[in-house]
Amino acid sequence: MKQLLKPDYIFESSWEVCNKVGGIYTVLSTRAKTLQEMFPDRILFIGPDFWKDKENPLFISDDDTLKAWREHAVENDDLKVRVGRWNIPGSPIVILIDFTPFYAKKNDIYTQAWLDFQVDSLHAYGDYDEASMFSYAAGKVVESFYRFNLKNTDNVVYQAHEWMTGLGALYIRKTLPQIATIFTTHATSIGRSIAGNNKPLYDYLFAYNGDQMARELNMESKHSIEKQTAHHVDCFTTVSEITNNECKELLDKPADVVLMNGFEDDFVPKGKAFGEKRKKARKALLNLANKLLGTKIGDDALIVGTSGRYEFKNKGINVYLEALNRLTRDKNLKKEIIAFINVPGWVGDVREDLKERMESNADFDTPLHVPFITHWLHNMSHDQVLDMLKYLNMSNAEDTKVKVIFIPCYLDGRDGILNMPYYDLLIGYDLTVYASYYEPWGYTPLESVAFHVPTVTTDLSGFGLWVNSIHGHYGQLGEGVKVIHRTDYNYSEVADAIKDTVSDFSNLPEKEVLSARKNAAAIAEKALWKHFIQYYYQAYDVALKNRTKRLSLENN
């Protein structure tokens, strides 16, 4: 840090500030403590105020923090803001904004963005308006705060995350050119769309034209704001080299700095508490399986799982199910396998029949109807997981060694069946599988190894590539992370590799299992923010220096 330019103030805006909807929440919330220690109360997060008058458990209102500015912003700048603390380690300052008043000016805002930066909002649909009005409002918040509290001599950085915050970054770039801007894309919108539409992304990446594909896939407006922001900020960043390749080809702009995603391990139990929590988690998962399936599976079963967003192909859920189906015919498999899918779907009601069994101390010897799922879905007849289980003719019958259970809800401790948070269950797994086809980073395998659970991932994830770079070769399961080579076309080979890995792991002696668990935790330690925060310091330095060059050119 001694050689690098340091900001006096940092503003960060994201759709996921005090709004737990995806992996970016984990990036911001785990990193906040490290930045708060380095820049105490000079790192300010800006998020959307969805809760308004309702209580948000992630937000602690504080009328005294930034009181003079808040009153000025409300009375003089016509901004509807609430100020408080984010209820996470470090307790950083948060400004939540009600952006709905800006809808009335939407057309004027979009027109100006076109005139200033050629941002095409004509083809907008879905969540584009909502995200853009929040983004613009965040820019207005920073403008108000800057003019009320700061001086031209202050080094100020504004970091915007994902296309949803691009409009605000461009507004600041024009209105307050003395602020250094950083834009971070965690996944290119067009790359995710190509992958999600079953088009081969990797073999043909060099041949794709981002603008042309945006037109073809009806992604023009999101692609436009993302591309223009990437080109006009002082420092453009992404989260892994694999996503940087997308940026080069699809946005015509390589990242200035790659910001790998770290995390904190303060939520991982230590010592005796770890063993107790693991035992409790295994008991809960086995109890669920036995009550749903009407079986008496013992504690020596291998508990396997996958989790994340419900992107059936991109997250590798399809190839995970294919591997489990092939595992049913694996003659080398010695243990029973309980394979969980913890992916929130279009969840309806809790299964009352299962709930009654869960509340009973009795043993059951008959399976429940549809013995694959813990909660009813609104789309039972059109759900991709259930459809594939049916297509594969998976049965969960007592005589099959492989049982599959789909938990289609957020594990927040209030699901009605397990009633335990995700991390309190993750610790009970023996092995996890994240066979992603499209995964810019990959927090789920990183969280897994943090809880000493060995994991399987692919080299199409940023995390998998990083693990390979640590070892200098493809990660092996004994080292804590098995990294499988994946391409556009080797689906069947990936399924076989997963099947073989699970089968081999089921046969490992206890000593080797403990070694793999220990090595998994060692990899997680290398990804702590104390190691990865340096990349953010580099980005601040690049942004501030580029701002100075830009201002010098503009003034001459």
Image: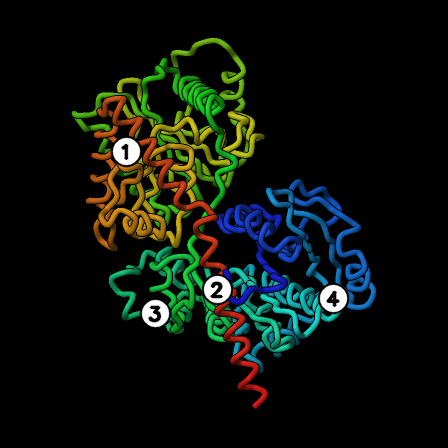
Give residue 324's mark: 1
Q: Is residue 158 above or below residue 328?
A: below
Mark 3 lies on a secondary structure that is: helix
Q: Badge 4 is on which residue?
A: 149
399 or 64: nearer the viewer: 64
Quadrant location, the C terminus? bottom right
The residue that appears at 61% across and 43% down in the rendered structure is: 88
The residues tagged by marks 1 and 4 sit, at their Cα atoms, a distance apart of 59 Å
Q: Amino acid at mark 2?
A: Ala
The residues tagged by marks 4 and 2 sit, at their Cα atoms, a distance apart of 24 Å
Q: Residue furthest front?
A: 2
Q: Residue furthest top?
A: 362
Q: Badge 3 is on which residue?
A: 249
The residues tagged by marks 3 and 4 sit, at their Cα atoms, a distance apart of 41 Å
| Nearer mark to the viewer, of 3 and 1 | 3
Question: Horizontal placement of 354 versus 429: left or right?
Answer: right
Q: Amino acid at mark 3?
A: Glu
